[in-house]
Amino acid sequence: MKHRMGFNRLGRKGSHRKALYRSMVTALFRYERIKTTKAKAREIKRVAEKMITRAKTDSVHNRRIIAKRIIEDNVLDKLFTEIAPRFEGRPGGYTRILKLGRRFGDASEMVFLELVERKEVVRKKKKKEQAAKED
């Protein structure tokens, strides 16, 4: 029976699942968008939104609690200095899941998990494209 089952175990042992959460949340905050399966995205979304809510108030206590789950120090700083201030007026719903379709190998549903207000990355144009426009 699955009564009052709180989360999806994702077919992993507890330690493996904890490591998966740590790496995926770190990647989400570093790149602000990750491609993963729908089941993983739904679980990572829960963890990430709780972290962003806690990061809104920058204190030593909150930093230590979140540092338990975020692997890299520069990503932790980015969360507290760049990401959390963007969501200051928002009461929740910091991430979104965009469906991509099914994966070719095993037909599992793939999605993008991204922050709602993410910083757009402007890509530099290649030298060939710049030379073509200048001519």
Image: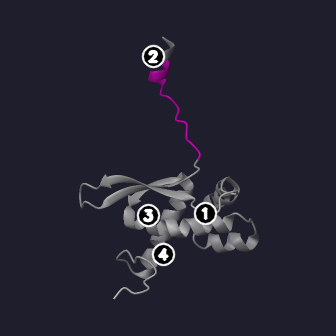
* Tag of residue 132: 2
Q: Position of residue 15 (x, y in %)?
A: 45, 79
Amino acid, disc 3? Ala
**Residue drawn at (51%, 59%) of the image:** 27
**Residue drawn at (38%, 67%) of the image:** 39
Label 4 residue SS? helix
Give the foreground label among 3 and 1: 1
Q: Which residues are magenta?
A: 119-132
* Tag of residue 18: 4
Q: Position of residue 105 (x, y in %)?
A: 23, 58
Q: Earlier in the sequence, mark 3 or mark 1?
A: 3
Q: Earlier in the sequence, mark 2 or mark 3?
A: 3
Label 2 residue SS? helix
**Residue drawn at (61%, 63%) of the image:** 92
Q: Taking 116 as reference, is 8 above or below it? A: below
Give the foreground label among 1 and 4: 1
Left or right of 85 on screen, residue 2: left
Q: Earlier in the sequence, mark 1 or mark 2?
A: 1
Q: Which residue is mark 1?
A: 92
**Residue drawn at (50%, 28%) of the image:** 125
Neighbour tally class for label 3: few under 14, some 14-19, many 20 plus, Cα within 10 Å: many
Label 1 residue SS? loop
Q: CA distance from mark 1 to mark 2?
A: 46 Å
Amino acid, disc 2? Ala
**Whether label 1 touches label 4, CB < 8 Å:** no
Q: Which quadrant of the rendered structure holds the N terminus?
A: bottom left
Q: Which residue is mark 3?
A: 41
Q: Position of residue 87 (x, y in %)?
A: 66, 56
